[in-house]
Amino acid sequence: MDHSVTLHDKTFVPFIPYEQIEEAIDWLAGILNNRYRDAKAPIALVCVLNGAIIFTAELMKRLEFPLELVSLKVSSYEGTTSTGEIHCVLSLSGSVEGKEVLIVEDIVDTGNTLETLVGTLREQGAASVKVCTLLFKPDAFKKGPELKPDYVGIEIPNRFIVGFGLDYDELGRNLKDIYVLK
Ligand code: IMP
Ligand code: MG
C-alpha cells in the first residue's frame, strides 16, 4: 500500500507516527509540570502561529499549572528553505510584561526565528524566556548554546518535514502524522 502524500509538486513519505508524537508530548508535559508546579504567577505560553498551533493545543491540555495563552505570527520559510529573514506578521495577542514566558514552537531549524522571538519578548518586558519545541534539527542549528531550546520533544536530521501543524507552502498542516520529503 502506498502511504505517500503529494502536496503541490512534492511527495512526502511517513516519518514520525502520531503515537510517537503523543509520547513525546506526554514526556514534555511531565517535565514542564515538574518545573512550573510551584510558579508564583501564571506562565505566559507563547504559541508561534501557525506551525505550533496543534502542538500548543496538545501540550496545553496536559499542563497542570496556571498559564495564560499569548500568540504571535512569524514567517521565514518560502517553499522548503528558510529565507533567514523573519517577518512578524501578527504582533503579540497579549502582554508578557513581567511574566515568565515559555515559547512553544513546532520546530527549531536554523534558530533564526527563535533569535528574533526571544529578542522581541525581552524587549516587551518578559521576566524570563524559555523555549519548548516539539522538534529540533541540531545539524541545521546555527546559533550559540545560549539560544538552544530548553525543552525538546524529538531531535530529527536536517530534512524537510510536514504534518502535525507543519506545512509546505501552507499545505499539509492537517496531517496527523509527520511526513518527510521523499
Ligand atoms: P528557523 O528560523 O530556521 O529555525 O525556522 C523555524 C521555522 O521554519 C519553524 O517555526 C517552521 O515554521 C519552519 N520550518 C523549519 N523547518 C521546517 C520543516 O522541516 N518543515 C516545515 N517548516 C519548517
Ligand atoms: Mg513555526
Image (tube, helix red, strand yellow):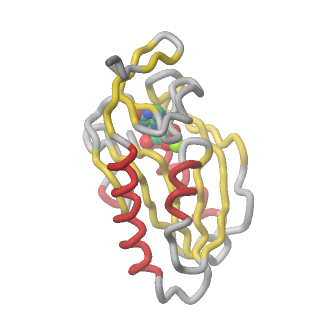
Q: Position of residue 169 (x, y in %)?
A: 56, 24
Residue at 32%, 18% (x, y): give it. Answer: 1
Apparent side of residue 152 relative to residue 173 in the rendered image (left or right):
left
Q: Position of residue 143 (x, y in %)?
A: 35, 48
Give the answer, above or below, for where 68 lies relative to 114.
Answer: below
x 61%, y 42%: residue? 50
Q: How many numbered discs sit on the rendered protein?
A: 0
Report the residue at 46% width, 66% height from top. Answer: 130
Percent x, y of residue 67: 61, 74
User: Observer-nearest residue: 169 or 138?
Assistant: 169
Q: Is residue 78 left or right of residue 18?
A: right
Residue sitting nearer the eye, 175 or 55:
175
The residue most toward the top is 9
For the C terminus, the image quarter is top left
Residue at 51% over, 25% down: 168
Pick the residue in front: 58 or 132: 58
Q: Position of residue 24 (x, y in %)?
A: 35, 57
Please tell me whether residue 59 is drawn above or below residue 21 in the rendered image. below
